[in-house]
Image: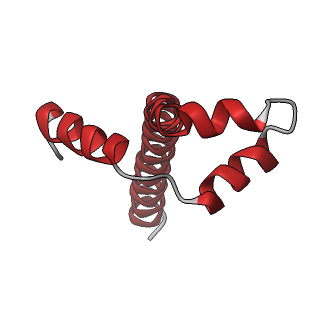
Amino acid sequence: MPSFSELLTSAKTYLNSPVPQKVIYGLRQLSPYAPARRFQDAGKTHLVVIYFLSLLVVAPCVYVFANKRYQAFKIRQEIKQIQRAREQEWAQEHN
């Protein structure tokens, strides 16, 4: 995972690079109520802010979802082990 300083330098590099017109057009399509001039004037800043905010929102959601799935998987495994143990006990008692 990149360090904070690496992320900061990559963000600064990105802010100093020109914004492709396709990206600006895509942002206009996503947000039709925002004036296009605002995106052209500060499009790079908006992109970086949107990117980092989306990471702040998406990353914990993905982690929680994956963790819940993993916990459910572990619980299902334990239930199967308990069922197998009970079946083996029952088979030993009735044979």
Pinpoint residue 64: horizontal percent, then vertical percent.
Answer: 47, 33
Residue 44, relative to residue 90: is it above or below? above
Drawn side of residue 29 relative to residue 93, left or right:
right
Residue situated in front as seen by the camera: 32 or 42:
42
Q: How is the image coloured?
A: secondary structure
Pinpoint residue 16: horizontal percent, then vertical percent.
Answer: 32, 44
Image mark count: 0
Q: Residue furthest bottom?
A: 95
Residue situated in front as seen by the camera: 58 or 77:
58
Pinpoint residue 8: horizontal percent, then vertical percent.
Answer: 22, 34
Q: Residue furthest right?
A: 33
Q: Residue at x 16, y 45 (%)?
A: 2
Residue situated in front as seen by the camera: 81 or 40:
40
Q: Residue at x 65, y 36 (%)?
A: 39
Q: Quadrant of the C terminus?
A: bottom left
Residue situated in front as seen by the camera: 2 or 35:
35
Residue 70, relative to residue 12: is it above or below? below
Drawn side of residue 39 relative to residue 17, left or right:
right
Drawn side of residue 44 relative to residue 11, left or right:
right
Q: Residue at x 49, y 28 (%)?
A: 53
What is the quadrant of residue 23 in the picture? bottom right
